[in-house]
Amino acid sequence: MLKKLEKINPAFGLLCIGCLLGGLKNGWFVFPVGIMICMLLWSRLRQSGRIYISRKFNIVYLLLLCLAAVSVMTAVSRGDAVVGLLKLVIMGIYIVWCLQMTEIEKTEAIANIPKLGILVLVSSALLIFLPSYRDVVINRAGRLSGIFEYSNTLALIFLISLAIYFELEDREHKATNREQLLYFATMVFGILWTGSRFTIVLMVIYLISLGIRHKRVNPAYILTAVIIVAFVILYSRFTGDARGIARIGTLFSNSSTLVGRVIYWKDGLQILLANPFGMGSMGWFLTQEATQSAPYVTKFVHNSFLQMGLDYGIGFMVATIGLALLSIIHARKGFKTLLVIIYMHMFFEFDSEYMVVLFIVILFVESDWLGVKDIPFEPKRLYINGALTVIVLLFILQSAF
């Protein structure tokens, strides 16, 4: 058993744990995983005796951390703001850990991501049979929200898994046609079950771009997709049920969710201009009732980039958008299109609140452009830097409360 666990790619194992813990949206789940990342990083440094660092990353990351620290001082709820800041600290440690990985390890982690889609779908489906969890994994609209407790981000995980599967299979051709077709049908069914109409549109865009890039399309995939969609539409027509999996039937006839998002963005932009240094994590949610232009209740603004601005300030938001563009330019071969689709999804959703999504994005980015260099690992220096970090965080906590 232990030998089998040793063979699991650490990065993929971390993604599996993160998904099973709800995508790492809940702060209480994030911190144990953060400790795990610290342990993995420490183990790697002790074994190699070298540490790979990037001056560019250090400067940008410290700048972002300072901007986030300022938002704690201006936060509506300083307790929530500190949690948001600590999540950024954990994200930085994860990136440093990724810098220590070899290209083989990164490629292996990415190659295993299609299994993540199956893991999430199966675990979500199994929870339906537990009465206490059924109302959590299937929301009131009849949509699969699964272990993420949110349908649209769950659909994004399925789309990422499907896209990576096709990118890798096109190059390696390890699976048989039957296996490829079964995986395709499973992920398409998962996306339809979430009822995420925008993700369905993105899936169609991705498959069309895949066909254009490779100048060929397997007719079996088209036939399978048509059969699944036709079944869902017929089910909707005969039963009159337009919820859950049948929401695809309202793809072009119901734009209420898009109108709602435009209202959120309009109100969010006005609040951001009034609070250029951010309001801290959950700040927008706690103040929206006093500033909203229409009656609604939502925790997030349904735009990851705008949400970052509301949480950490305009400077943080602009820097994040710039980093997103650079990540597309310097993405691993074959994943530029997928990153564009992920960011398009993030523009309409709060996917960045789920740290697992950000973990996956980081794996797609090449580290060469960061100017990475290795130096001897000195535990004493790490202790000093760690102590200074703790002192700074304690100062922020003291200032916050």
Image: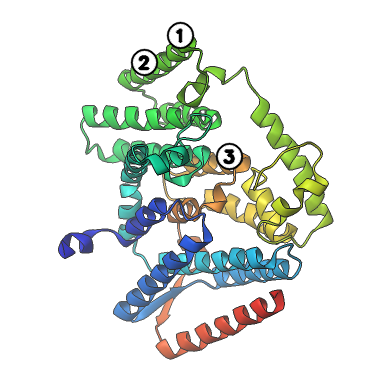
Do callouts 3 and 1 mark residues in contact (Cβ within 8 Å)? no
Q: Could you classify mark 1 by the number of other residues whose Cα lies within 10 Å: few (under 14), some (14-19), or many (20 or more)?
A: few
Residue 18 picture location, percent across and down: 41, 55
Marks 2 and 1, how far apart at CA: 16 Å
C-alpha separation, residue under disc 3 versus residue under disc 1: 34 Å
**Of pointers 3 and 1, the one earlier in the residue sequence:** 1
**Rendered residue at 74%/71% (across/down):** 73
Residue drawn at (46%, 25%) of the image? 245
> Which label lies toward us, 3 or 2?
2
Q: Which mark is residue 344?
A: 3
What secondary structure is found at the residue carrying circle 3?
Answer: helix
Residue where numbered disc 2 is placed:
227
Residue type highlighted by circle 3 = Met
Report helix, strand or loop for mark 1.
Answer: helix
Q: Is residue 99 visible?
A: no
Q: Which residue is mark 1?
A: 238
Q: Position of residue 66 (x, y in %)?
A: 67, 71
Could you tell me which residue is drawn at 54 percent across and 28 percent down?
Answer: 197
Q: Position of residue 275 (x, y in %)?
A: 80, 58
Badge nearest the viewer, 2 or 1: 1
Amino acid tagged 1: Phe
Q: Crowding at label 3, few (<14), some or many (≥20) Cα neighbours within 10 Å? A: some
Q: Which residue is the extreme one toward the top?
A: 238
Q: Earlier in the sequence, mark 3 or mark 2?
A: 2
Q: Please identify, in this view, whether the residue under mark 3 or under mark 1 is nearer the observer.
A: 1
C-beta proximity under 8 Å, tags 3 and 2: no
Q: As displayed, is residue 206 above or below residue 80?
A: above
Q: Is residue 105 toward the left or the right of residue 6 in the image?
A: right
Residue type pointed to by label 2: Ile
